[in-house]
Amino acid sequence: MPLLSGGSLNEPAVRELSFSSAALDVAKGPPLIGHCSNPGCRTSWLQLFRQRTRPIFEAGWTCSRECTQAKLRLAVRRELDGRVQGQETHRHRIPLGLLMLEKGWISSQQLRRAVETQRRSGVLRIGEWLIRQGATDEALVTRALGLQWGCPVLSLSSGRLAGRHQLLPRLFVDAFGALPLQGSSGRILYLGFEQSVDPALAFSVQRIQCARVECGILQSSKFKDVLGSTNNQSFNSVQLAEATSEFAAAHILAKSIERAHPISSRLVRVHEWLWLRMVLKSPALPEPMDAYTSDVLCRIRV
């Protein structure tokens, strides 16, 4: 199993950020007679007189607020219609306790005791009870989780995680138990999960970053240490919004784009959330990431 190790992760956090031209989708503005990326645009030659080179949404320039809204309506519909896209088909997974029993890492008596305690208490996972009762240690439980999910165990010290938190909103870190990490080559983005892998989240991050994303398991104590050592200022500022319909969601997101006029922006869905990431300007050292990126999370209230 591949393990993440040192390398470029020891460099200052801001230098870990790599933005390819594909990831930024930066456009240099429309030519003399621009082509609006809204397929329903009817302004034709009048675009010649528009003093507007932004915003850019999903690699395309829009010539007016109306065209931005029209394009966002199409994008919102695409994300909501593609709910099964990127989600892993259900696969039966051997329960963690049985997997550890099969490997000979615990005895049947230890497993039975942990299961009974878990049933009575109704809290904690089976692996945590096995650790508490001295049947095994955290490293072995983490290894078993990696086998259960068919992914590597990521071996990283807390210091090497600094600087990658901004690539994922804090809300997603808390809700899905995932931390974004960068491999030593800087070309692969890893999502380190505490307990269970979320393929839908990984697929969305891959689309928003235009980079290869791999999943892995992080030891629970290390995950909590990293999260405990950060604060809300360590993450990107996020605008949260609720909408009553697809149309209202598109209106909110289009309004955010028109206000920010980003040089690049993308929309993806993460479960019930629509995630809009906007790049406001080209990255420049040593500015913090939130100086040139902004996130909007919108949920449609049913």
Image (cartoon, rainbow, N blue to C red):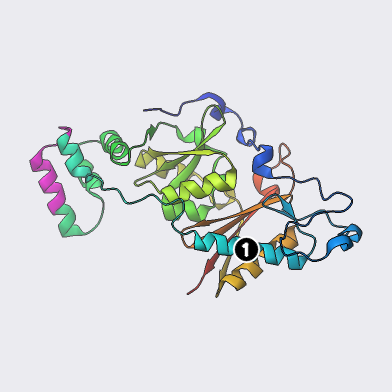
Residue drawn where x is 58% and y is 63% of the image: 76
Q: Within the magenta stretch, is there residue 111?
A: yes
Left or right: residue 239 compared with residue 34: left
Residue drawn where x is 45% and y is 32% of the image: 157
Horizontal and vertical percent for residue 1?
36, 28
Residue 138 or residue 202, whichever sits in front: 202
Residue 193 or residue 247, whichever sits in front: 247
Res. 278 in view: no
Is the residue 1 above or below the residue 246 in the image? above
Res. 3 in view: yes
* Label 1, residues with CA under 10 Å away: few <14, some 14-19, many ≥20: some
Horizontal and vertical percent for residue 201?
46, 50
Q: Within the magenta stretch, is there residue 206?
A: no
Residue drawn where x is 72% and y is 63% of the image: 68
Horizontal and vertical percent for residue 222?
40, 39
Res 156 quadrant in image: top left
Range covered by the magenta-colored residues: 103-116
Give the dominant element type of the magenta stretch: helix, strand or loop. helix
Horizontal and vertical percent for residue 30?
83, 51
Residue that mark 1 sits on: 74
Left or right: residue 98 compared with residue 147: left
Specify the farthest residue to the top. 7
For badge 1, the amino acid type reads Leu
Q: Secondary structure at mark 1?
A: helix
Left or right: residue 73 compared with residue 219: right
